Amino acid sequence: MKVSSMTSCQIRGRKRERLIAGIWIFVLTSFVCSCSRVPDNPRQTVSPGKIPVATVPIRPGSIKTFRTIPGRVTFDPRFYRRVMARVSAISTIRLRAFPGDSVRRGEVVAILKSPDFLAAESELVSVVNNRGGKIESPDSLLSLAKNKLVYMGASRKEIRRLMKTLRPSDRYEVRSPMDGTIVKTGEIEGSQVHPGDVLFEVSDLHHLWVKAFIYPGEEGRIRRGSLVWVRTLHPPVRKVQAMVEQVSPMVDPMTRTIPIRISLTNPGLFFEPDLWVSVLIPKAEFKKGPMFVVPARAIFENRFGKPNVIVRNRSGGFRRVEILAVSSSQGGETAVSGNFLDGDQAVTEGLNRMRSLIR
């Protein structure tokens, strides 16, 4: 019994000795490895031959930044006409133009069958027959009959035709008052027409309005005559320059915003009424010292949360530059203000390794 107990004690002692020896070996090995490691020099100049990097030249300049708000394209009332019937008609005989069709000024759009127009032409023919075709004074019955036809919408060509043929007709021709595009037609063929009924609407789509809304407090930077950009929301993207025509002095009660009206010239007919667009309003430029343009992907934040850029100078050395002011990015580039020198290039690739070596 004594021999077995002595043997177990010896076994436990040997295990303890081996454990302590292993711990000392691990400590000594770690110490030797740490001593053999060469410490990094935080001020060393990193060569592009050791770390593959890509750089982009830093150029002086600034970037125009915009604030984008939604807008809706509408008709310009100055280039929009709503044609209504001036006489009653039994029916619409024919429509010669439909929504989307282009018309010229004076072109016949609709033909009506009107007993009232027939009676007015018959009255002129009766006056001519009774007076023997003599030229009368302006206040004569002949002038009154002509003025009545003009008021009804008869053209001078129709009156000359009637004076020559002396054959009245019940065909009432409705013409377009301007060059443009038919937007809407009212009465269809065969429908009875009453005075005041809308026959068609025509607009010159080369001149449109854009209605947008801004928040109170922004109207000071947007005034009448300010230049903005209007851009389509669908491809192909079109962007044209336009001018603010009015900033409303009142607030819209539904949206609590201020309506603005933009005059849009549409030579290529890229913009259509009721189309939603983006209105780009230029922002006021913030400058603090000379401005430079650098790639947005070259900017990173240091441990204090401040933006930095690693640049390579003409001699091939690298350094960090803290950016003093940063504007909004556009097209992958950013306008910044910092202590840049002539010939500096911003590091865009291999940036993470450079950040760990350049303090």
Image (spheres, rainbow, N blue to C red):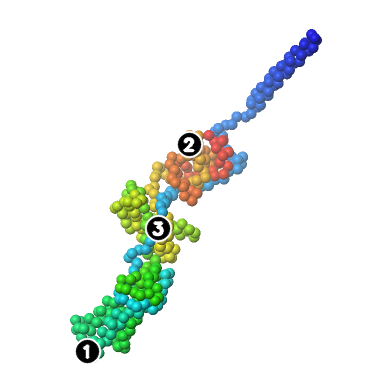
Q: Which label's residue is closer to the chain start, 1 or 3?
A: 3
Q: CA distance from mark 1 to mark 3?
A: 59 Å
Q: Which residue is mark 2?
A: 305
Find numbered disc 1 in the image and state the secondary structure of the residue it sits on: helix
Tag count: 3
Are the two marked residues, 1 and 3, in contact with CB atoms closer than 8 angstroms?
A: no
Residue type beneath disc 2: Gly
Are the two marked residues, 1 and 2, in contact with CB atoms closer than 8 angstroms?
A: no
Q: Nearer the viewer, mark 1 or mark 3?
A: 1
Q: Is residue 315 visible?
A: no
Tell me: 75 left or right of 41.
left
Q: Which residue is mark 3?
A: 72
Q: Which label's residue is closer to the chain start, 2 or 3?
A: 3
Residue found 78% across the figure and 13% down from its top? 7
> Which residue is more in the foreground, 165 or 216?
165
Q: Which residue is mark 1?
A: 131
> Residue 157 at x, y = what percent?
32, 82
> Residue 322 at x, y = what percent?
47, 38
> Which residue is more in the foreground, 203 or 287?
203
Residue type beneath disc 3: Arg
Tell me: 21 left or right of 170.
right
Q: CA distance from mark 2 to mark 3?
A: 40 Å
Residue type beneath disc 1: Arg
